[in-house]
Image (cartoon, rainbow, N blue to C red):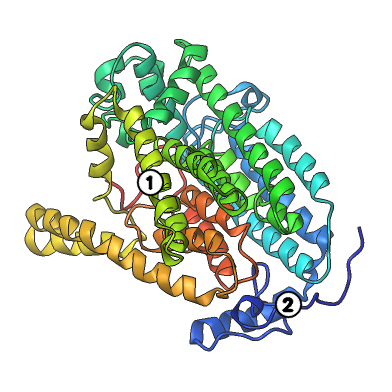
Amino acid sequence: MTRVSTHPPGPPGPAGSDTLPFTAPDLAVGNGPVEWVMSRVIRKLAWSRLSDPTVALTLSGAGLLLGMIVGATAPNAETIPLRLPLSHLLPALGHSETNVVIASILLYTGNILACLGLAGMLWAHSQGWRPNPKHLLWASAAIIAVMVSLTPVGSSDTASYAAYGRIAALGGNPYTTGPLAFLGPHSSYTQAVGTLWKTQPSVYGPFATVIQSFAASIGGPNVSVTVWALMILNGAVFIGVGFLLLKTSDDPVRATLFWTANPVLIQQLVSGGHLDTLVAAAAICAIQVARRVSGMWGDVVIGVVIGLACGIKINAVLIALGLAWPLLRRHEWMRTTRIALVALATVALQYWPYGLVALRPIFGGLKLATLPSPWRVLELIGAGLGGPGAEHTVATVMGYLWPAAMIIVAWFVYQRISSDQPGEVVAPFALTYAWILVAPWVFAWYTGIAWVALTQVPRNRMTRWLTLVTVFLALCHSSGGQATPGIR
């Protein structure tokens, strides 16, 4: 592969005023002070050695390797307290003060190197580097094949998935009871769950429960096998999305760099084993069908896929709203109605065995806030000024205000992207990106749904910010289930 030293021409206007993910030196910059500073910093970096493909790939690999070392030395402060097959190759770091610092430094350094590697690859691409996307797909598949056999890193969510699956597999209702109450304090499943979530009923949808129960039926009483099954499924879906993007994207190289070869995303979605990978998979399937298939059956497929996605995590409704927006603007009332009815019917069928009680934990979670969200700052101020009652009032008001703020931010994001781009990709990205910025409860792995939508959006200014926000959230919230400042 050779590197061309000239920039490919970009389209005029806002869509061509930025590149992937940062402004190329010869393109126009924004007028705002933050945009001005960012663009000038990027002018220096974009032509540094960082944009050399070899350097960028090396940094990406080093970042992923550091994260994998953390998983291979489990249990430690950044992993859940169990070991998957390849985690037995190295001795456990444990939880001594020194080893806590070592694990954190390894993971945080890995996240930063992954960010630099991603930026370098995308700058190199903007300067003419055209890697073979199939080679990138195979390389990522090899890395992921190893990663899924290492203990999940940066979150205890996979342990919660396993526990809810175990509850469902034993005939319990994970929406009315938590791991501690149903499985007992001595269960290996309960012991693997993060401290804050042992009493929490499931906040995931019924389709997620089916997946979790399937994994638990494989693992039985062995929580490590259940988590391993979940990790393998998650890694397979991630690569499957990469293959879909390779075959259906207008620019397969760009889409592959944004998803399959994205070290930041691999670290968050695959190494962490998060269900957000499955939500992103459903999102891109719905987007691609909406762009390429018309007629009644196309609408049915879109509705079913969206309904299943909402049956995993409720934030998938943002994709539904994003796809509905361009349809409504074109006055395609019948299509919108068909998709909505099919999606609602799919969701209703999933919740039917559990009833409305299954929605209670989900809607309760919508009022939670965590730092660095400014909403959490408001909660803390309310508690300080008026006690717990005031904090509850602030949380209630927040539950009404942040969705409105999300719509406003999404509108501005939508306007910053060229109007000649297909609304079926721009609107879902704008909504999911705004949700990450505005929602009171958000983590780095939540950005997967915005990243997968971004693979289909042509050049735009938002990419740099999505990259930085993802890494910033990863640095703010990364643990193996220990209490994190700002989380209750």
Q: Position of residue 282 (x, y in %)?
A: 52, 41
Q: Position of residue 414 (x, y in %)?
A: 48, 71
Q: Nearer the viewer, residue 95 or 146?
A: 146
Q: Is residue 76 left or right of residue 382?
A: right
For the C terminus, give its image quadrant: top left
Q: CA distance from mark 2 to mark 1?
A: 37 Å
Q: Secondary structure at mark 1?
A: helix
- Which circle marks residue 10 in the picture? 2
Residue at numbered disc 1: 340
Q: Residue at x 35, y 71 (%)?
A: 408
Badge 1, how many Cα within 10 Å: few under 14, some, many 20+?
many
From what the image shows, is residue 359 above or below residue 454? above
Q: Residue at x 43, y 67 (%)?
A: 329
Badge 2, how many Cα within 10 Å: few under 14, some, many 20+?
some
Q: Is there any visible trace of residue 106 in the rendered image?
A: no
Q: Amino acid at mark 1?
A: Ala
